[in-house]
Image: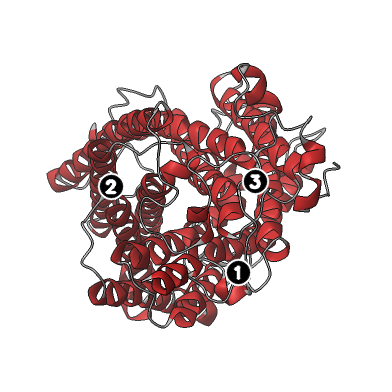
Amino acid sequence: MTATEAHPEVHDHDADLSVSESSSDGLYLLFVSNDHKMIGRLWTGAAVLFLLWISVIGVLNGFERASLGDMDLFSTVAGYFQSWILFRTGGIFMVALPLFIGIATAIVPLQVGSPAIAFPRLAAASFWAWLAGAGIHLASFYVLDGGLGPDAGTSTDGTLLTVTSLGLMIGAILAASICIATTVVALRPAGMTLMRVPAFAWSMLVATSVWLLSLPVLVANLIYAFADMQGREPIAFGNADRLWGDVSWAWEQPQVYAYAIPVLGVLADIGPAAAKTRQVNRPVILTMIGLFGALSFGAWAQHSFSRGADPVFTDGNRIYDEFLYIVFGLVIVLPILGVIGGVLDTVRRGANPKPGAALTGALMGAILLLLAAVAGEIRVIPLWDGLHEDNVLLSTTTAQLNLVLAAIVVSAIGALAWWAPKMFGGYAREPLAMLAILTVFGAGLLGGVADLISGLMGQPDISVSDAVDSGVETLNVVAAIGAILLVLSGLAIVGSLMAAGRSTETLPDDPWEGHSLEWAAPSPPPIGNFVEPIPMITSEAPLLDEFEEVS
């Protein structure tokens, strides 16, 4: 089976390349399997471990800010800024995107009724390439004193390695995105139109499409910087004083929302199934998810190439409010409200589900995403021009990032609790999963709101030398406490998933009375996923159709 073959008919021929899940050689299976469930577990497990590390970085950054510039934890301002950058690069490309890629790699083929993921060898290779890039990225900071931003504390060799490793991670993520998107587009069974695809699979199609269109632009920015640093002192794209400004659009509005598109899909999938009813106005919900994806495309909003797109670090650090930038910032809240409102209306009409970890995580993740959009509103409302100072711009950016990261992690915990029988062969431990959800929600809320308020009070986010008053000091302590909660949540996630993976309990195929095709497969699914052939699909909820026919 070549890397480009994806048809289910050749799955048996590929048996020598995809080791059986019952193999006693677990380590061998770990490295050579191209079964999508195993690959998904690898992505998810690595992302959770990196979440623990990112949480520790957040604690150190938070308490350094709370020390009001005494530099108790970092010897120089440059050292603090390196850690500040590492939290951002790691938070998105080592935690947020890998979490959803892992869940999607394991679940999307099941949802669309495919026995395998498209391009299985590429899917497996993408994980190992990403893991290598992540390891090199850490080494570039901790061994070679690298980074992406000012100041004289970074070395050229370290910065080159940082740029290279970031490009490697993005390339691997894009390769995994191709596998997921192709699975949704090309491997659906007869009768499953795109409008009948489960909401999570649909959201991953939207998300991977936006990533495939926007992240190559970031790679191009990195190539510019890499070339500029060759053979002489960099003068433009690789210059330390502007390197972060050239690439920071990928962590700012509107692009920061692109990483959270699956949050809406998780809610739209879990809500109706938990309420045991069909989603009301489902085409509208899918359209809202697509609209959110379109509004989150942010490659056009680059500081260096688009002078109208919030160039915080250029031209005297002033903001230039372009019409398009303002419209994107104001309108993007509408699809989030549309999805949340539509799902809650469906849940209200349904069977009054218990607030378990899955539904709680899905709903709280969407609420955090809505709060991030509200922070974006504060950033772009033209009538608030008097507040458009550097500290407000930087603090709203940080608040948005914290809230979006928290939204992704909370939503992913809910998704893992929901799909644990298919991914791990056991139930996630409900108390631990709920603890993780509540602590991440609290961490995101504390960190995001504290950063936003401190900016409005006059404290720049990246400054570790100046504080306005004791009120800002208190807010910095609050943000640091939020980071501690994130560490606790990471431990809770690890415990819950380990318990699910070690379960020896025999599970029913459909423990939640779900609506979509993943619940027609055994728990856990074997190689090939489905025991029986997939029949003609006549609606978006084939299992609910079957249940209604029987009753």
Decide which of tag 2 and tag 3 comes sooner along the chain.
3
**Where is 501 relative to 458, above or below?**
above
| x then y, percent, for residue 501 | 43, 30
Q: Which residue is mark 1?
A: 307
SS under mark 2 = helix
- Type of residue at label 2? Gly
Pointers 3 and 1 in contact (C-beta within 8 Å): no
**Where is 438 relative to 296, above or below?**
above
- Type of residue at label 3? Ile
- Type of residue at label 1? Arg
| x then y, percent, for residue 383 | 33, 81
Residue 66 figure quarter:
top left
Q: Residue furthest front?
A: 550
Q: Nearer the viewer, mark 2 or mark 1?
A: 2
**Where is 289 relative to 507, above or below?**
below
Q: Residue at x 41, y 60 (%)?
A: 514
Q: Nearer the viewer, mark 3 or mark 1?
A: 3
Residue 249 is at least partly visible in this image? yes
| x then y, percent, for residue 141 | 56, 26
Q: Which residue is mark 2?
A: 447
Q: Is 449 on the left or on the right of 321, as rendered? A: left
Task: Looking at the picture, tell me which residue is in the foreground, 237 or 92.
Answer: 92
Q: Residue furthest right?
A: 2
Q: Nearer the viewer, mark 2 or mark 3?
A: 3
Structural distance between the alpha carbons of marks 2 and 3: 27 Å
| x then y, percent, for residue 261 | 49, 62
What mark, if any, has residue 115 been given in the picture?
Answer: none
What mark, if any, has residue 173 been given in the picture?
Answer: 3
Q: Residue at x 67, y 47 (%)?
A: 176
**Where is 332 relative to 247, above or below?**
below
**How many residues crowd around disc 2 within 10 Å: few (fewer than 14), some, or many (20 or more)?**
many
